[in-house]
């Protein structure tokens, strides 16, 4: 039987999946039809749950070093400074949530870090490689690839379409992409320099009589660029001159000169959900499965978690256990539908000019995403995100539950009793309690509280950081 997994699409979703497979020693190829890697900010908001995923994948330090916290926005009306607002009020970390605040990093920066990490496992994106066609049977997927005019036939155990909203994989399968594209709303987006502005802040420029209609300039980390955003009307081609025209119209001053346009696009609300995420040995993930408005910063993050959900399940199937893989569609399509609803609500607020249209709360963090049975009423149930907690190891050194979870394995926590034999099983004990075998000490009781654990409670943690079972 074929063991290879073929991933079509090397955006954040495909890279996350390929990385998760590679660290499990699963043979993987990741292809992308683009000859050059994407260079632009696009999905630049990384949510707290995605930071936890990046912690597990070994890229969190690089993401944090390359990015920045969400900046304050300085509001100017008719050129005069009026107030300062934040989309998100910073939150202090807690024992259960170590990364409570969103992080800003242009999508191309995130992709570069994921590519570098993937390369550490000997896997590289095959650029300029097109998926021409594929078919499948009970045993394998046979795909035809084309690069530089030469064709290659590849036999894979599974094919994953992470190839964007115009997905070749989805279209070949004939899976409906249900929803709509609203041509009445268009936004001009781009990455530019604006050296007259302090790069530590974001800016909102508008007329006093129409304060909700204007230009936003949000600083991007790693240089001097800002992400430009403005409502777009007309048929003019996006260009530096056009962006400058909008700034001149809304900013009420004449000293802001835009330079170095590196990326520009016209965005239209595209809200769609694939009718199904799986057809036999072929799967959809990311934008190929769900298309989001950018409001709320949900699209890229949801795609990354599609890949993270799917990786360990493909590995299990390749090892002979199909049961986890059968849950991919039900878990992730339900999440995508919910997140699409949230993004659409936030877009409606923006269009309606609500004063709090730019405010973001815990609903966008994705920390509350759960796969629990709707009938479950326990404070923590199978399918919930597994909380973090500070502990001490057998030598008395500080350690966290997330340190135990990190890596491509299932983790068993046995509260107050010796853990069953197993490489990744730990007893979680209170200070002074004698115990044999691998264990950690819940010095302040945060782990017992977070897991609502009594003595003898056992909790199985899935490889993707969700509770698999409680007994």
Image (tube, helix red, strand yellow):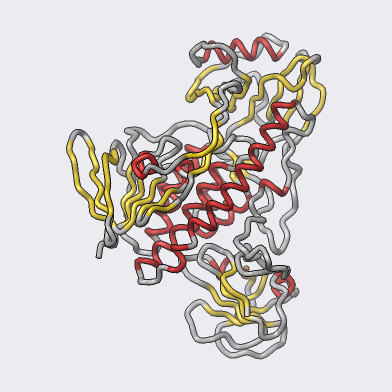
Examine the rendered structure and indicate whether residue 62 appears above or below residue 36. below
- Is residue 9 visible from the viewing direction of this image? no
- Is residue 370 visible from the viewing direction of this image? yes
Describe residue 284's horizontal placement relative to residue 87 as left or right.
Answer: left
Describe residue 247's horizontal placement relative to residue 190 as left or right.
Answer: right
Q: Position of residue 227 (x, y in %)?
A: 58, 27
- Out of 253 and 33, give the one closest to the viewer: 33
Q: Quadrant of the C terminus?
A: bottom right
- The image quarter containing residue 133 is top left
Q: Position of residue 328 (x, y in %)?
A: 48, 58
- Residue at 64 percent of width and 37 percent of height: 344
Q: Quadrant of the N terminus?
A: bottom left
Describe residue 95's horizontal placement relative to residue 277 as left or right.
Answer: right
- Out of 429 and 292, give the one closest to the viewer: 292
Q: Position of residue 171 (x, y in %)?
A: 37, 39
- Residue at 62 percent of width and 68 percent of height: 400
Q: Position of residue 102 (x, y in %)?
A: 65, 45
Examine the rendered structure and indicate whether residue 433 appears above or below residue 184. below
Q: Residue farthest to the left?
A: 150
- Residue at 56 percent of width and 36 percent of height: 271
- Residue at 58 percent of width and 56 percent of height: 52
């Amino acid at each position: 039987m074929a063991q290879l997994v073929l991933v079509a699409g090397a955006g954040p979703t495909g890279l996350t999946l390929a990385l998760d497979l590679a660290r499990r020693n699963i043979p993987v190829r990741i292809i992308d039809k683009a000859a050059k890697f994407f260079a632009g900010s696009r999905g630049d908001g990384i949510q707290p749950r995605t930071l936890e995923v990046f912690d597990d994948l070994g890229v969190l330090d690089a993401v944090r070093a390359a990015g920045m916290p969400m900046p304050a926005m300085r509001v100017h009306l008719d050129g005069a400074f009026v107030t300062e607002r934040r989309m998100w009020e910073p939150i202090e970390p807690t024992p259960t949530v170590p990364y409570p605040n969103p992080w800003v990093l242009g999508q191309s920066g995130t992709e570069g870090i994921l590519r570098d990490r993937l390369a550490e496992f000997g896997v590289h994106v095959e650029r300029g490689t097109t998926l021409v066609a594929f078919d499948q049977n009970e045993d394998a997927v046979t795909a035809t690839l084309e690069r530089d005019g030469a064709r290659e036939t590849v036999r894979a155990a599974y094919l994953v379409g992470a190839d964007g909203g115009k997905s070749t994989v989805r279209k070949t399968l004939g899976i409906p992409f249900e929803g709509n594209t609203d041509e009445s709303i268009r936004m001009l987006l781009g990455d530019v320099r604006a050296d007259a502005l302090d790069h530590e802040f974001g800016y909102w420029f508008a007329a006093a009589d129409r304060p909700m209609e204007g230009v936003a300039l949000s600083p991007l980390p790693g240089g001097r660029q800002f992400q430009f955003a403005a409502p777009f009307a007309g048929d003019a081609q996006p260009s530096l001159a056009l962006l400058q025209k909008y700034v001149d119209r809304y900013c009420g001053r004449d000293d802001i000169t835009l330079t170095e346009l590196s990326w520009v696009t016209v965005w239209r609300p595209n809200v769609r959900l694939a009718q199904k995420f799986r057809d036999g040995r072929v799967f959809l993930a990311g934008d190929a499965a769900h298309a989001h408005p950018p409001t709320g910063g949900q699209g890229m993050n949801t795609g990354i978690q599609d890949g993270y959900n799917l990786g360990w399940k493909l590995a299990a199937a390749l090892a002979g256990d199909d049961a986890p893989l059968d849950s991919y569609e039900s878990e992730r399509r339900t999440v995508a539908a919910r997140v699409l609803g949230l993004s659409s609500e936030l877009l409606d607020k923006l269009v309606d000019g609500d004063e709090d249209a730019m405010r973001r709360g815990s609903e966008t963090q994705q920390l509350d995403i759960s796969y629990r049975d709707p009938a479950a009423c326990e404070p923590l149930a199978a399918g919930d995100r597994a909380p973090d907690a500070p502990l001490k190891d057998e030598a008395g050194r500080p350690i966290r539950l997330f340190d135990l979870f990190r890596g491509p394995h299932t983790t068993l926590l046995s509260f107050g009793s010796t853990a069953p034999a197993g490489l990744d099983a730990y007893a979680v004990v209170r200070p002074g309690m004698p115990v044999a075998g691998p264990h950690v000490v819940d010095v302040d009781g945060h782990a017992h509280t977070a897991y609502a654990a009594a003595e003898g409670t056992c909790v199985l943690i899935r490889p993707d950081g969700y509770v698999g079972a409680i007994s």
